[in-house]
Amino acid sequence: MDISYRWLSDYIAHDLSPDELAHALTMSGLEVEDVTRRGPASEGVVVGHVEAVRSHPNADKLVLCDVNIGTDAPLQIVCGAPNVAAGQRVPVATVGTTLRLPEDDTRVPFTLEAVELRGEASQGMICSGHELEISDDQDGILVLSDDAPVGTPLADYLATQGLALTDHVLDIAITPNRPDAVSHIGVARDVAALTQGTLRRPDVDYPHTDSDAPPFEVSIEAPDACPRYVGLRVTGVTVDESPAWLQQRLAAVGLRPRNNVVDITNYVMYECGQPLHAFDYDRLQGPAIRVRLAEGGETFTTLDDVSRDVPAGALLICDANAPVALAGIMGSANSEVTGDTTDLLIESAYFNPVTIRKAAKALQLSTDSSYRFERGVDADGQVWAAFRAAVLIAEIAGGEIDPDGFRDAHPRPQEPLMLDLRVERVAQLLGTPLTAGTLTQILSALGFGVDAAADDVLRCEVPLFRPDVRQEVDLIEEVARIYGYDQIPTPSHTRIPTHTPQALPSTTLRAQARTILTGTGHREVFTNSMLRKETADRFNQPPLGGAKDGAVVETLNPISREMAALRPTLLPGMLDVLQFNHNHGQDALHFFELGHVFRQDTDGGTVVQGYAEHEALLIASCGPVDTAAWDRTPRPADVFDMKGVVDALLRDLRVPDVAMEAVYESSDLTQHHLTITAQGAPIGMIATLAPALTADYDLEQDVCIAELDWAAVIALAAPHLERRFTPVQRFPVVERDLAVVVDDATPAGAMLDAIRAAGEPLLNAADVFDLYQGKGIPEGQKSVAFTLRFGADRTLTDSEVDAKMRAILTALQSNFDAELRG
Amino acid sequence: MLDRIDALREELTDVTLTTLDEAEDFRITYLGQRSGIITNLFKKIGQVAPADRPTVGKQLNALKQRAEAIHQEAVDRLEQAAGPAAPDVDLTLPGRTPRVGSVHPLAQTLHDITRLFERFGFAVAEGPEIEDDWHNFTALNFPPEHPARDMQDTFFVEPPEGPRNGVVLRTHTSPVQIRVMENTAPPVRIIAPGRVYRNEAISYKSFCLFHQVEGLYVDEGVTLGDLKHILRTFAEAFFGADVQMRFRPSYFPFTEPSAEVDIWWADPEHPDGGRWMEILGSGMVHPNVLEAVGADPERYTGYAFGMGVERIAMLRYGIDDIRTFYENDVRFLQQF
């Protein structure tokens, strides 16, 4: 909301500069986001008299003007404005003056110099209202009245006309709790409280009779939606352009001047916050005003010439026949003030904020008026605003206030809220004591009625323009913000509860996983949780997502189709990352991500019913596993690299009883994969992705991924976070190798399982150290060599180890037809 | 014999060796296997009277050691001066670099913020990203149809007109306050990091999702002064002890009084030499929020604060486009 520095000073006398004012307001809750200067950036614009206009010898569209600015000789100024003429009094920017000239949508400082234009000297510039930021008029130079004193600074002359040459506009970000501050008087009230000044609200007379025979009727059929409707008739007006001072003020706050009647209703709205509407009285049927709720199915054409479907429950202002306005939002051309209008009905109403908000939202139409009504206007401000506008209209547009033409339909009067404010409570909340005197002074300045109810309790009457103040704590905030948050001392000590917070296992385990995975050379990524619905569906299928199923979750109001669904797995985001980096010349791509994934749920038991959400971990590798070096050629990462990383990770996190089962069938997404279980329950999978999938992401090399249900991993690992020491074996370890020849298809994993079973309890570790096919091994067979470590809490004898070796060999022979390799 | 030894000892004191060749000549002259002077004396030890042999042997040994020491010292000194021997390994070849990983800058910043507050006794709490209306809005004192709901552009999963008044992607981490307090009686002192969503146009300064850290402390006797204290502590830890900050009134439905914190960010290009940057929102927990979770607002007071992690990471690392975080360019990631 724009506030004019000069306009504001109509209501409060203060000695703050624009920047000081901005700071004071910001520090009291009205955040000033920007201060913009309007008008020339320096002195030097004076009133000049055009003594003669001569043609320019070298240009058709330019003329030479002799302009007297009160100096000895007139200046020659080259001018291109069509309306310049001898005898005019005009604003002249002299050499050295800095103007802020319009350029695109902004203004750029420009300092005038003595120049030659097409060969003729020009010693200044005759300015338009637009160039001086006084008005929007760009069509020609600004012509002043004939009595403007030649040679005086323009600012001085304009001041005598009620116009300001310079102003500052403060752009205030109004928080939703401050409907009172959406006006100059509202902001001035805060300034008054901050500077201990006095708010000056213009005095307005209310000339009216309580006539029994009103010229028009007001009937309210929806009193909850329209608790108050004030109508006031003004007759005999002449609709015309607004005077310059009014146009200037509206322009300062970003409004386009229209005509004097509409401009005055806007002016009063920006003055006091009450939206007004002026109807052409003669175009109202009846004449009558009927306020009713829309039933749905009606259409209405608003002032902007758009035919709109009126949502049921929206409030309509109707005359005897038909709707004439969407209450609180916008009027209609059918009753609009035009150049021919002579009699007006000024509407000044209080509409229910929720009614207006719902209608404006349904219509997707937000106006200055709806913005104020949905926040809540002063429920006591309607009569003042109506007469304030009427008086100004009578002054500016002629006409008279019809003393019989005043209606104040007020079916739901509001009583001011009374609140007790405990002096002690203020200290409790703010941490610093404030006296009853300070509290009273601040609240009174803000318009609250304050009485001492008891020694330490203040009885406060909340003014109706502060609908946001509902409780004692709201009063405390009012006090605190004017007193100044910066004045509230920061204690040198602070209390901490005596209980020690426990580290959350998920935080600890996540940090552990990051350490491991960065150690294995993976970079962490953060990807978007939202993606195309089609993409989400493509990835929401086995074997991804473990044992979980459920449809993809969609948002009802996505930013775009590209982000219409929530990720059911981290894989699509990861593939985007691989693709992006691959296309930017990176080849060794090793990443991981921790993030939430989402599915619809029908089983129940989720935090928010209907939605299964859990944290997942995705690890991905594509491209060389090592960096290249002078003695090695990098090898592309494969599924065994991923298997090793996952194995190391789960082992380090102490996830118990991890098993992996190979699945050789391919799917739309995978070439083959391994399912991972812990204690028999699925916790994830490892896969080599299908080439058809990775090709869609421009990736030529195999992509291997591991996807873990991180929430499940945390649950399994959390009990093992606490470590217990096991004595290190002090006795010698015996290492033996065993090489066997088996059928090509015999799985090494199963052989290792058999070895471990047969080697118990002396066998401590078993691993494959060589795999060989070729010369010396029969066709269709392979040699698998195992390294075996035996140990116990004593020194093993050779015969003990020999016995175990025989048992192991026997197990391999009987289970796999293995033959000892000679 | 002993005289000869004495003479040789005397001779050795005058030896100066200035080249490796001289050192080798010296060795051959005195210590050579075949005809070294000292070697030869050892050969003649049999001719010494048996009674004198131990003395002579001892002195001869000392002489030999002395000659060896002179030679070795000269060789060491001269070899060092002559520079290294020809290498049999080229140590200038590059090392075999292991593949290195990295933690995402947002994760690092989240971690650092969380850790700082953990040092002040805050426990970490987490919550879901799909939230119901109660936790995201209503319990936090956002009345239905209040313009405050427009402060956060919301993604809906179920419409507000639905049976649960809407299911949303959480617009802030504040619902974690409610979830914790629903299950825990005061004192509550938590920090809640997590991802939040806003239906805003994507640009260099706003993304459709970002991360927040929420803090909450509810206890007897918590004041606005305490809030100022913890936030100053945070700002100093993150932006330096000389950070300039300001604490100004604002509005959030779930806190009253509410405040925003700005820090002064020096920027030589800016006409004012810098500008105030908002880093977080905060305030005293609204009594309606305490009532919504069954805590007595007369007995307990509390403060809450919430900060945008991206904003803080951008300031901290000098990143000027929020989208960079979600692009995951390796050349970006490897800088952290």
Image (tube, rainbow, N blue to C red):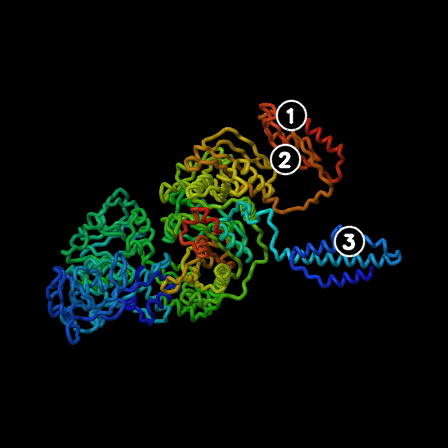
* Residue placed under numbered mark 2 in the picture: A767
Query: At 45% across and 58% down in the image, what residue appears?
Result: B282
Label 1 vs 2, first from the N-terminus = 2
Instruction: Give, as a three-letter code, the residue at label 3.
Output: Thr
Q: Say whether residue A394 is left or right of residue A496.
A: left
| Residue A329 percent location from the top left of the image | 27, 52
Residue A448 visible (yes or no): no
* Residue placed under numbered mark 3 in the picture: B39
Secondary structure found at label 2: strand
Subunit ID for the residue under disc 3: B
> Disc 1 or disc 3, which is closer to the eye?
3
Secondary structure found at label 3: helix
* Residue placed under numbered mark 1 in the picture: A818
| Residue A24 percent location from the top left of the image | 37, 66
Image quarter in which the N terminus of chain A is found: bottom left
Query: At 11% across and 69% down in the image, what residue appears?
Result: A52
* Label 1 – label 3 distance at C-alpha: 70 Å
**Residue nearest the viewer, comparing B123 with A349:** B123
Instruction: Give, as a three-letter code, the residue at label 1.
Output: Ala
> Disc 3 or disc 2, which is closer to the eye?
3
Subunit ID for the residue under disc 2: A
